[in-house]
Amino acid sequence: MMLKAQKRIAAIVLKCSPQKVLFDTEKLSEIKEAITKQDIKTLISDGVIKRLKSNKQSKSRARVRATQRSKGRQRGQGSRKGKATARLSKKTRWVNRIRLQRDLLKKLRDDDSITKKIYRELYMKSKGGFFRSKRHIELYISEHSLISKKQ
């Protein structure tokens, strides 16, 4: 039986979604004959058409938390599950780190702070994973006094 129209009208009367409208399976012929809002209202009062109960669980707190998370809050150590690689893969971390290091080396080379030979040595060390970070390269350069005195 096609009762789409009745379901739609009942949803309007009950002020809910058509998915929340429940028909009594034994009285489907009566429901089929109902074509006006008044007919539907009488069927509702008789208990032939019912409305499914809502969840009764408020999502307001969940929404507040979601907005806070979008701002970057509530993402500390205690909220994390899984390994660090689950959040950011090893490859992505490597790519970010190596790009930063290479940019620094290029900048130093272009400023004539380091020679091309030193640039190549540091580049290959960086490629091999010798340096942990940009700061580590800077420390290495200062410790080994690799910056040329042309400045």
Image: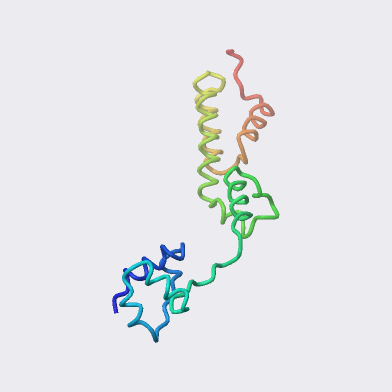
Out of 64 and 54, give the one closest to the viewer: 54
In the drawing, does residue 133 fall left or right of residue 15?
A: right
Please, is residue 3 above or below residue 141 in the view? below
In the drawing, does residue 5 fall left or right of residue 58?
A: left
Query: Which quadrant holds the C terminus?
Result: top right
List x then y, in percent, for residue 130.
60, 42
Q: Residue furthest left?
A: 2
List x then y, in percent, for residue 55.
56, 67
Please, is residue 122 above or below residue 36 in the view? above
When asked about the image quadrant of residue 135, the answer is top right
Out of 136 and 4, give the one closest to the viewer: 4
List x then y, in percent, for residue 33.
31, 77
Q: Residue furthest bottom?
A: 26
Residue at (59, 18) in percent of width and height: 148
Q: Residue furthest top?
A: 151
When asked about the image quadrant of residue 73, the answer is top right
Way the structure is coloured: rainbow
Q: How many marks?
A: 0
Residue at (67, 26) in percent of width and height: 142
Residue at (48, 71) in percent of width and height: 51
Query: Which quadrant holds the N terminus?
Result: bottom left
Out of 27 and 139, give the one closest to the viewer: 27
Please, is residue 19 above or below residue 79 in the view? below
List x then y, in percent, for residue 62.
61, 55
